[in-house]
Amino acid sequence: MSTHLLDALGRPLRDLRISVTDRCNFRCSYCMPKQVFDKHYEFLPHKELLTFEEITRLARVFVGLGVRKLRLTGGEPLLRRGLEDLVAMLAELRTPEGSPADLTLTTNASLLARKAAALKAAGLQRLTVSLDGLDDAVFQRMNDVGFPVAEVLAGIEAAQAVGLAPIKVNMVVKRGANEDQILPMVRHFKGTGVRLRFIEYMDVGATNGWRMDEVLPSGEILALLRREFDLRAVAADDPGETAERFAHADGGGEIGLISSVTRAFCRDCNRARLSTEGKLYTCLFAHRGDDLRGLLRSRADDAMIAAAVQAVWARRSDRYSELRGAGQAPVAERKIEMHYIGG
Ligand code: SAM
Ligand code: SF4
Ligand code: SF4
């Protein structure tokens, strides 16, 4: 199988984000606002979900096509029962060069203290935790289910204790909601080995009521940080990297800025997303995906599935954030939701 698959804008396929559930035990207002995702909301029934065997088969095909990074996400991935079994299956995959794929997970950490050891034993290498503040009142307003900060921190500690590394912490910054947590978060994680990254609040989906004036541009975050910390820019490890990285000059570790709104990084975007029920999306802001589950459940062999993925990738020309930045974002159809497709 070719490892030089390029899309219509010359971008390779390197990163596959796999959503393992559309459910979550948080109701972050920027992702699953309570008014929409209430007790009447219909999540996918179990039979619609890809099985672990189906996910692994697809992941194998994607790795054969050049994918080097597999990220499990959701919804809240740790809500999917037996997730460590899927981790173990994915950890067995090998690239055409014979190396394992870079296998990671994004989680709200609510179940991490309980699951860190099993995930590590199954072969997970590292993980990303989402945490939007250190102050309980602020964080509980952000997660909107009254979940305490202390349990997330306990999850992070458990992950560090079992040797998952590096651990990244993502903080979505929403102006007027949690920007007063930026400095306390940097102070807290400096020197701990945890890489804190600030993410600009994005206009994903159609339910979060996004407004540009609630975005705190990364440039403003950096200016704020530089008043207290001596930060030096660090070169990116690879061209598809989403974060601009900065190191504390005194050796206290790194922070990152993910400027999804103010500095679009579509030009190097090498990410594909697989939804919980097996649709392939080539952009976070897509409004439709290509069904792979139908193929999996037909008699198609791996070569046929690979050909279908190749065809989708070859015609990919998505660059939503760049167009939004240029004031040309298409407003037409309903975009997919973040909890369904993962971050
Ligand atoms: N539930 C897990 C979690 O929160 O880590 C995984 C799924 S969540 C959809 C993945 C990431 O997307 C999280 O870091 C979350 O903060 C981020 N996210 C969700 N909605 C967002 C938005 N509107 N703008 C920016 N980031 C967002
Ligand atoms: Fe759940 Fe993650 Fe979305 Fe928050 S960001 S509602 S934790 S899926
Ligand atoms: Fe990639 Fe789409 Fe985000 Fe651009 S807008 S970086 S193409 S996911």
Image (spheres, rainbow, N blue to C red):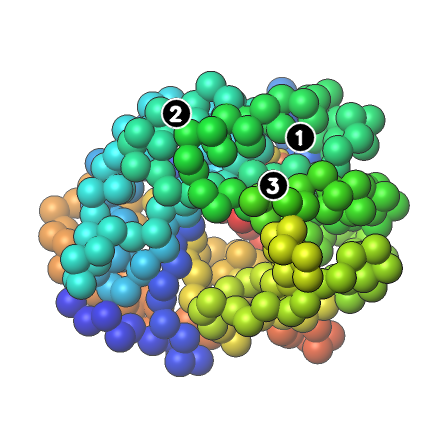
Q: Quadrant of residue 47?
A: top left
Q: Residues within 10 Å of mark 2 (few under 14, many from 20)?
A: some
- Gap between marks 3 and 2, in whole Å? 20 Å
Counting residues from the start of the chain, the first of labels 1 and 2 encountered is 1
Residue 313 appears in which quarter of the rendering?
bottom left
Under circle 3, the secondary element is loop
- Type of amino acid under label 1: Arg
The alpha-carbon separation of the residues under discs 1 and 3 comes to 28 Å
- For the question of whether residue 205 can be seen, the reply is no
**Three-letter amino acid code at disc 3?**
Thr
Residue 1 relative to residue 281: left or right: left
- 89 relative to 106 in the view: left or right: left
Q: Give yes or no for contact between labels 1 and 3 (Cβ–Cβ under 8 Å).
A: no
Q: Residue at x 63, y 73 (%)?
A: 322
Tag 1 residue:
27
Q: Look at 64% across and 60% down and name the residue there.
A: 247
At horizontal 61% and vertical 27% (from top left) the residue drawn is 152
- For marks 3 and 2 on the same chain, the one whose residue lies earlier in the sequence: 2
- The part of the image, by quadrant, that contains residue 218 is bottom right
Residue tagged 3: 192
Question: How many numbered callouts?
Answer: 3
Element on which disc 1 rests: loop
What residue sits right under mark 2 in the picture? 117
